[in-house]
Image (cartoon, helix red, strand yellow):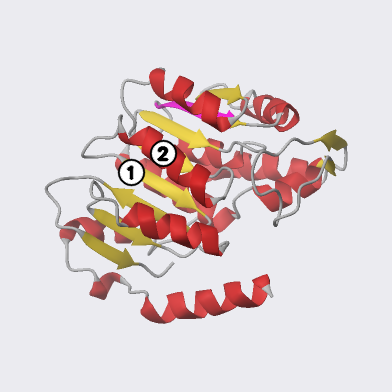
Amino acid sequence: MKAVKLILNFIKYYFVSVGRHGLQSSFMYNLNEFVWRRDRKDADQEKIEKYRQSLLSDNTIVSVRDFGAGFGGKVYKQLPISFIAKRSSKPPKYARMLFRLSKYLKPQYILEVGTSVGISALYQAKGSPAAQVITLEGCDQTASLARKGFAQFPELNIEVIEGEFSLTLPQAISKMPRLDFVYLDGNHKLKPTLEYFEMCLANVHDDTVIIVDDINWSEEMQEAWKEISSHPRVTISIDVFMMGLVFFNKGFSKEKFVVRY
């Protein structure tokens, strides 16, 4: 039933979404041209995809600890690494989107809530290799896997903080002078998602982007996205079906976009 609803939601999204000719503002047009219109593989991404493939072929069983909605709504105590990598890592298409968005916006401070095995953090960091990246993971086993993966990319500055997000998120925010780029990919329930968003608001500025993952994954996440995109401090919101982005530039008129990707 959930899969059917997701397909119906995607059909609705597809018919209301717009491409380059439906984007009137120069900011949105240029963002679309760089981030969504041209989905090209980059040489910088090859090593990350090799790391992904090594995880997908690793059937070692590890203990998992999940504070949120679990995998597909189910909570497990033990899983093979291959399962975790397949089910919790962003598909290459959306990982490349994060890479291009980071490359376009050039953030200095990147915060991710929900590390898993580290694929999305690597893509964001590769997009802006001089950035300080802090990523939060609730499970010590997956955090350990991510650290081992990050060690293969010594040119990137990625720190993993493990623990329950409600405790580690304030700690991470305090370690950064501001938040330029935030990716919320943890818990996937209404109340915690809104709480994480509110925690981040104190450190956002005109050029900050907050990306909310899986905005159509469940009714709770749809409601979370509705509230976040309508927040008084948000000026531009962008729905690309699997993710939603919000910007805070006070020079922009308040607009909501559904962009085809």
Q: Residue 196 versus residue 144: which sits nearer the camera?
A: 196
Residue 86 tag number? none
- Relative to residue 195, is residue 159 depicted above or below? above
| Three-letter amino acid code of the residue under disc 1 | Val
Taking the spot 31% from the left edge, 20% from the top edge, the residue there is 177
Can residue 42 be spotted in the picture?
no
| Label 2, label 1: how far apart the Cα atoms are | 6 Å
Which residue has dot 1 on it? Answer: 209
Dividing the picture into quadrants, the one containing residue 35 is bottom left
Q: Quadrant of the C terminus?
A: bottom left
Determine the residue located farthest toward the front in the rendered image. 191
Residue 210 image point, x, y percent = 37, 44
User: Where, quadrant-wise, is the N terminus in this rendering?
Assistant: bottom right
Q: What is the secondary structure assignment of the residue under circle 2?
A: strand
- Of all residues, the one furthest to the left in this rendering is 251
- What residue do we see at 36% from left, 52% from top? 228
Q: Which structural element holds mark 1?
A: strand
Mark 2 and mark 1 lie on one chain; the one further toward the N terminus is: 2
The magenta-colored residue range is 131-136
**Which quarter of the picture shows residue 114?**
top right
Is disc 2 in contact with disc 1, using a CB cutoff of under 8 Å?
Answer: yes
Q: Is residue 128 visible?
A: yes
Mark 2 sits on what residue?
182
